């Protein structure tokens, strides 16, 4: 199995994430996309944001009808700071994939050499960088080991959705209906 990994806050997950994941799977010819919601920052104020359990629940709802998408609670259930390298080791044990593609945005790729144990990360997976034509050239010590995918920006962000909900506006068409219903039922982003 060729497994692609998509880490993010997913606060909330939206059609931008889903479209990006679909395109990435088809370009890479990978078998499955695993969404990995990140743990909440222990020191950061949660005002205006939702907690890890709600983000996990919404991500599960967002992917539920897609046969090639699934969600992992690996980072939100791990105590303390989560390092990508530990997530990859754990995923390798759990899923035993033939190949792992770790998908990251171009902004994160530029500072990849500063991550915890980057040399081990590139042993464990292929790094796929979502690069938009407008992005600056990435300079990282590991650029040679990265696969660059030119992906268009879909015009939606979680920040925009949180703001719309906060001001009582509609988010129809920006997130799957089940996610929209969850946000209403749990009074998120109010
Ligand atoms: P926020 O607005 O809260 O910063 P976000 O919408 O960027 O959130 P994240 O959960 O941070 O969502 O997304 C993880 C990664 O998904 C981003 O780093 C980016 O690479 C990619 N991504 C998110 N939204 C889009 C989009 N609309 N089009 C293309 N890529 C996206």
Image: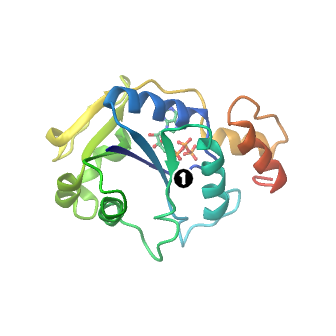
Tell me how the rendering is colored.
Answer: rainbow
Q: Position of residue 2 (x, y in %)?
A: 31, 42
User: Considering only vertical position in the picture, is 79 above or below 159?
Assistant: below
User: Considering only vertical position in the picture, is 166 above or below 17?
Assistant: below
Residue bearing mark 1: 9
Q: Is residue 161 visible?
A: yes
Q: Position of residue 49 (x, y in %)?
A: 67, 57
Q: Position of residue 29 (x, y in %)?
A: 33, 30
Q: Is residue 11 visible?
A: no
| Left or right placement of residue 142 versus residue 190 in this view | left
Query: Exactly how many numbered labels are in the figure?
Result: 1
Q: Residue at x 60, y 63 (%)?
A: 52
User: Considering only vertical position in the picture, is 89 above or below 60?
Assistant: below
177 or 50, which lies in front? 177
Q: Residue at x 58, y 27 (%)?
A: 155
Q: Residue at x 76, y 31 (%)?
A: 172
Q: Position of residue 39 (x, y in %)?
A: 52, 64
Which element type, helix, strand or loop, lies under badge 1? loop
Q: Is mark 1 within 8 Å of ligand 1?
A: yes
CA neighbours of label 1 inside 10 A, class few (<14), some (14 to 19), many (20+): some
User: Considering only vertical position in the picture, is 107 above or below 154?
Assistant: below
Q: Which quarter of the rendered picture does the N terminus lie within? A: top left
């Amino acid at each position: 199995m060729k497994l692609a990994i998509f880490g993010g806050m997913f606060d909330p997950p939206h059609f931008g994430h889903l479209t990006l994941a679909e395109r990435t799977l088809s370009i890479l010819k990978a078998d499955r996309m695993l969404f990995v919601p990140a743990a909440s920052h222990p020191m950061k104020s949660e005002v205006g944001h939702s907690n890890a359990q709600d983000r996990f629940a919404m991500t599960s709802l967002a992917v539920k009808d897609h046969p090639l998408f699934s969600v992992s609670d690996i980072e939100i259930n791990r105590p303390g700071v989560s390092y990508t390298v530990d997530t990859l080791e754990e995923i390798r044990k759990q899923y035993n994939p033939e190949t792992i593609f770790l998908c990251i945005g171009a902004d994160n790729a530029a500072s990849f050499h500063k991550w915890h144990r980057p040399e081990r990360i590139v042993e464990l997976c292929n790094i796929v960088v979502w690069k938009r034509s407008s992005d600056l050239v990435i300079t990282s010590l590991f650029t040679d080991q990265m696969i660059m995918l030119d992906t268009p920006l879909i015009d939606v962000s979680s920040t925009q959705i949180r703001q719309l909900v906060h001001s009582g506006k509609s988010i129809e068409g920006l997130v799957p209906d089940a996610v929209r219903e969850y946000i209403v039922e749990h009074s998120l982003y109010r």
